[in-house]
Image (cartoon, rainbow, N blue to C red):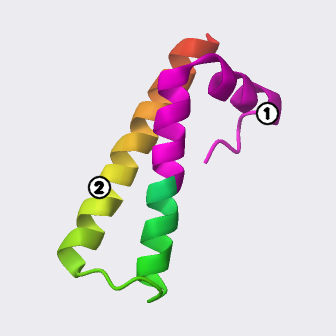
Amino acid sequence: MFEDRSVSELDSLIKGNPEFRQLYQHHQDLDRRVMNAELGISPVDDLELTRMKREKLHAKDRLFRMAGSLLH
């Protein structure tokens, strides 16, 4: 997700900002749940899958905005 950032920058954000860390972990959890649903590992109806994808995208957008403001 943060391919354009160095590992040390991402690590610094995660360790230095509790809100960023919590949101990052939430995004990772959603990513795992969406992938499991798409692979058929976890049965999820289409409405729930769409909701998870929207929530994941919202979290990603917030993470990018936070990273931009925290690193500049």
Numbered label attached to residue 50 = none
Task: Identify which amino acid the numbered label 2 is placed on.
Answer: Arg
| Mark 1 or mark 2: whose residue is earlier in sequence | 1
**The C terminus appears in which quarter of the rendering?**
top right
The disc at residue 6 is 1
Is residue 62 shown in magenta?
no
Residue visible at 47% across and 86% down? 41
Residue 2 coordinates in the image, percent (x, y): 65, 41
4 to the left or right of 41: right
What's the residue at 49%, 73% (across, down)?
A: 35
Label 1 sits on a secondary structure element that is loop
Q: CA distance from mark 1 to mark 2?
A: 26 Å
Secondary structure mostly taken by the magenta-highlighted segment of the chain: helix
Q: Residues within 10 Å of mark 1 (few under 14, many from 20)?
A: few
* Residue sticking out furthest to the top: 72
Q: Looking at this rendering, what residue extends furthest in the bottom direction?
A: 40
Q: Which residue is mark 2?
A: 54
> Residues in magenta?
1-28
Q: In this image, 14 relative to 22: left or right? A: right
Q: Are marks 1 and 2 in contact (CB under 8 Å)?
A: no
Q: Dividing the picture into quarters, in which one does residue 8 lie?
A: top right
**Residue type beneath disc 1:** Ser
Residue 25: percent from left, percent from top = 53, 44
Residue at (70%, 31%) from the top-left corner?
A: 10
Specify whether residue 26 is painted magenta.
yes
Q: Is 36 situated above or below 26?
A: below
